[in-house]
Amino acid sequence: MPSPSNRVKEIVPSKSLEIAIKVLDLREDGHGVIGLHVGEADFNTPSSILKSTQKALSENKTKYDLVQGNLELRKSIAQRFNKLNHGNITAQNIILGNGSKHILYNVFQSLLNPGDEVIIPRPYWVTFPESVKLAGGIPKFVSSSKGFQLDLDAIKEAIGPKTKAIVINSPNNPSGVIYPPHVLSQLLTLAKEKDLIIISDEAYEGFIYDEERPFSLYSLDKETINNTITVQSFSKTFSMTGFRIGYAVASNSWITHLKNLGGHQVGNICTFAQYGAIEALSLSEEEMQTHVRELQERRDLAYKLFSSLFDCFKPQGGFCLFPNVSKYIEEGRFTSSQSMAMEILEKTHVAVLPGEAFGLPDHLRLSFTPSKDDIKNAFQKIKEFL
């Protein structure tokens, strides 16, 4: 049998896959497992979104659509983006994709030549380096400063002749940190000086706690669209993970490149799902804030409990805690966060993710998206185990 391509063989399997398989096995054996490993809130998709999707199906809106995405939807996205960022983009600055993973894959395919480098600050979302490698690029990891903030000196030092882009993610998955405007402004100035693209993943922009929404790069400088590609998603903000709708905001030239690639790759994304997304953008801010307030309460509870066990940063946004567990590893109780996560799962039936998956092997990622009772029970089980 022919061997697979080198680019596929070089993909690092998801560190969470072993955990997910073990969770499935335990549940099939009748064990209850508390899932602190899933980055998905337990909120139902709003009923009005479902009705609009069903209406589109009943009206037979199941045919091909534009590769770039439904025009009405793109206009609505542009309107929301401009309102949040005091901007002036149009529907022509937007392209839809099958979730933000698909958008990121296409961005790197359109941007990189073999050997080009992409700077990725730690901790990072697991898909960033693999998407870079699939495009023939080289991920170049840099450490963050205290509190998981961007280390601009480290980023500047990492820039070389083959550097093409910098990836940032705010609110960050897994740490929940938000990058402040003065840091983003300096990063943008650096990108302009070095003629680099900043790829800004803002999938969690709908879940911010304790403060106003995070600053998008675009809100700092309208000309930044020439040096940025903003990636967003309907999955988190609108509880539409299964709809698989993400989008990019970029200059007309980059949208053209992405559109040309998409035309030979998938064509349009699911037609009738886009009508559900149109409805999502009409929801009131108060409707969405109900979910934000609930997750903030869960975050507060999870932080209060787990910070008694671990050195833990309080997340400003997103869905997860990312505590440092190095003391348990240094004591010799576990060989790594991967072994710690597996042993916690086997002994307590609580699923967490190892920090290796996110570039910091002395951490664990704990989602606070389950119910408050599940969070309390998970904490008690892990506390007794430790």
Image (spheres, rainbow, N blue to C red):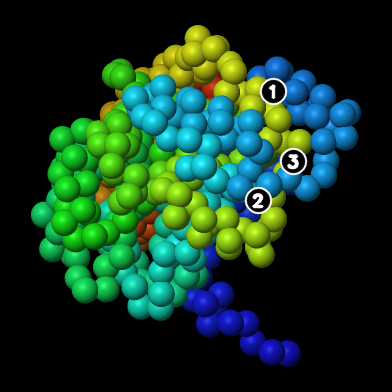
- Real-space CA distance between mark 2 and mark 3, rounded to the nearest whole angstrom: 10 Å
Residue underneath mark 3 = 271
Q: Earlier in the sequence, mark 3 or mark 1?
A: 1
Which element is circle 1 on?
A: helix
In this view, 162 is above or below 124: below
> Which of 367/281 is in front?
281
On-image quarter of the C terminus: top left
**Residue, disc 1:** 49
Which residue corresponds to the image point at 18% horizontal and 40% vertical from the top-left?
185
Whether 181 is drawn above or below 256: the answer is above
Query: Which of the numbered marks, if any, corresponds to residue 67?
Result: 2
Q: Where is the N terminus found, in terms of image quarters?
A: bottom right
Q: Earlier in the sequence, mark 2 or mark 3?
A: 2
Residue 250: give x, y in percent of width and height: 42, 46
The crowding category of the residue bearing disc 3, from other C-alpha atoms within 10 Å (few below 14, some 14 to 19, many at least 20), is many
Q: Could you tell me residue 67's position as x and y percent?
A: 65, 51
Query: Identity of the amino acid at label 3?
Result: Thr
